[in-house]
Amino acid sequence: MKLPNIYEGNYSWLVIFPILLIIISLFLLPNLKYGIELNGGMLITIMSSNQVDEQQIRSILSQNGIDSAEIRLYSNPEGYIIEIETEIDSRILEIDDKIARLDFISKQIGDIESELARLRAEQQSTGKDLSSQISSDEQKIAELIAEALSLQDEVFSLSQSLMNAEPTTKKHIGNEIVKIQKASNAVFSEAKLAYKEQLISRLYSSLSVKDIKLEEVSASLSRLFVNKVLNVALISALLAVVMVFLIFRTFVPSLAVLVGAFSDITMALGAMALFEIPLTLASFATLMTLAALSLDTDMMLTIKTVKRKEGTPRERAYDAFRTGFAMTTTVIVAFFILLILGIVSHIPTYYQIGAVAVAGLIGDLIATWCLNAVLVLWYLEGKYENIIRMVKR
């Protein structure tokens, strides 16, 4: 079947659809969910021999202080599968922050003690009176130790609440920051272990559990993942901008390529927010793949339309459209099969990759051939000069 030439006649109206989709996607972005890798949390997977009621699971979770959870129930020939995705308990987050503060205090004390050693050595070797500086630094250390002891008390109190029992770990009552840290970390580990064991024990005693698996991503690890994701995205964007401008060395065609890639990612994120597909490491990797595929089709369009001279610009754009449409739809079919496999097999990673790729590639078709192509044709047909003249009038 021959594709119609969408660039015949008044093709400028084509930009309306992608612009509307971009605006809608931007409004949806605040609703984007984050997976446990980027937000922290627990994923509990249970294999049960009996069918389970969701309300029963929520009742068990509430006994462990979990009031908000996403529960997914599946069935297969071997039994029933329950997936429970929860945020990290607020007490764990609070303890984690206090442990981080203790680590910072330890570093501060180490720096001050190094300065104190230097001041004492200088006073002894030169005879200068540095007692006021030494006294000030000693006072700072005493204040920091007092804060550390207070934080240790709070960590122990929260840990006791988390495990519903008196911890076996003992507090450190001296002024050695390393031992205060050690005691705080030990009671935190004890409390987290007891918290998980209580939760698993309650699930085992209330459900006909064949097997159970618990995965946890801590708040500190999720922050590390977020930083890595942002760094990768920033470096990728900068490299893409540099490479595009080096290839075309003309502002408008280069901008058109980048606008197409930006629109593709924006539409994909909007679709993720709309269909509640979380942003995870798997879906982020898919977004990076989409950016590469989008740049590929955008550059193919721009090279064929701008750099080649045979025929009219509209004919060259249509020729690129036929090639690009075939390329993208082929990839959509491949990812759609992965999406179906993810739905049937209940494997979240397959589902996320397939769904994000299909949504993003459909967005790529719209952004490339209804927005990017129009921007390039406006440039080649001198319509920007007409727009500037109208504005000046």
Image: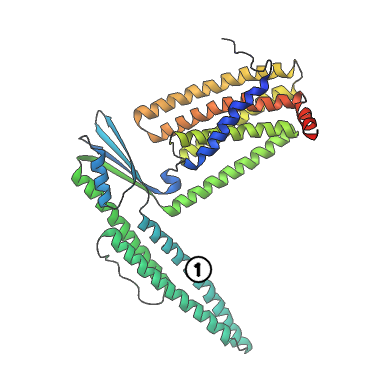
Residue 90, image x, y percentages: 37, 55
- Pointer 1 local density, CA inside 10 Å: few below 14, some 14–19, many at least 20: few
Spot the residue most to the top: 1
Residue behind mark 1? 107
Tell me if 251 is positioned left or right of 240 in this view: right
Looking at the rendered structure, the kind of residue marked 1 is Lys
> Measured along the vertical axis of the image, is residue 53 above or below residue 358?
below
Residue 15, image x, y percentages: 63, 26
| Quarter occupied by the N terminus | top right
> Measured along the vertical axis of the image, is residue 386 above or below residue 140?
above
State which quadrant residue 115 falls in: bottom right
* Residue drawn at (62%, 40%) of the image: 237
Tell me if 14 is positioned left or right of 305 in this view: left
Q: Please give the count of numbered marks on the rendered protein.
A: 1
| Quarter occupied by the C terminus | top right
* Residue drawn at (73%, 25%) of the image: 378
Where disc 1 sits, the SS reads helix
Residue 232, image x, y percentages: 56, 44
State which quadrant residue 122 falls in: bottom right
* Colouring: rainbow
* Residue drawn at (50%, 81%) of the image: 139
Tell me if 196 is positioned left or right of 232 in this view: left
> Measured along the vertical axis of the image, is residue 134 above or below residue 260?
below
Residue 8, image x, y percentages: 68, 15
